[in-house]
Amino acid sequence: PRSGIAERIWDAARTEFSKRGYHGARVQGIARGAACNVALMYRHWASKRALYVDILRAVWIASANEIAERLEDGSVGSDAVVVAYVDAMMADPVGAQILIREYLDGAPFLGQLAANDPSIVEPLRRAAATLAPGAPGGLDPTLAVVTVGGVAALVASTREVARPFTGEPPDPDAWRRHVLDLLVHGLSRTG
């Protein structure tokens, strides 16, 4: 969005959608967060849906570009895919929360985006192709990438969850190392 009020609306909407999802988000909450009125918000976006779809597309494309960039260095296999997804999601925890809420709703808007522009799922297909050479027999690389992406979005958006148990959220680098170790090596190591 352009700088100024549109940028404030965009940022407030990202926060509102990350906390409440599409259905729970209120335009009054977005306007309040942007320090404007609802009418001004509607001058920039035709509807809450239009604003949400723009934000969802931007989050999806930004994370997909980051994942593709990380995999273009020639890395292959499950470790490379896990690292790419975790790092992309941790780069934008608010965006990761938006994706999680979209997934929990059954991904209706993401499905519409993919139907209208099939190219947005191309990075997912490339990640699946990166995974395919090392995929154990019977493992569907596309489903594996979808699962890794969902788990990465979930853990990236939940670093604060540790606060009640540890007194404070873990350091971002320590959290990243923990998540990668857990996803790549599991709870128990052999050998």
Image (cartoon, helix red, strand yellow):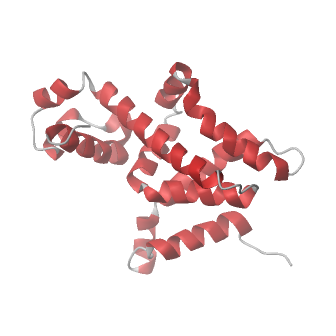
- 21 sits to left or right of 70: left
Pick out the residue farthest to the right.
137
Q: Nearer the viewer, residue 156 or 114?
A: 114
Quadrant of the drawing holding the C terminus: bottom right
Q: Nearer the viewer, residue 42 or 69?
A: 69
| The quadrant where residue 83 appears | bottom right
| Residue found at x 52% / y 45% | 65
| Residue found at x 58% / y 25% | 118
Quadrant of the drawing holding the N terminus: top left
- 26 sits to left or right of 128: left
Q: Is residue 135 visible?
A: no
Q: How many marks?
A: 0
| The quadrant where residue 92 appears | bottom left
| The quadrant where residue 43 appears | top left
| Residue found at x 74% / y 48% | 130
- 29 sits to left or right of 123: left
Q: Nearer the viewer, residue 188 or 139?
A: 139
Residue 42, compared with residue 33, is above or below; it is above
| Residue found at x 80% / y 46% | 132
Residue 58, compared with residue 15, is above or below; it is above
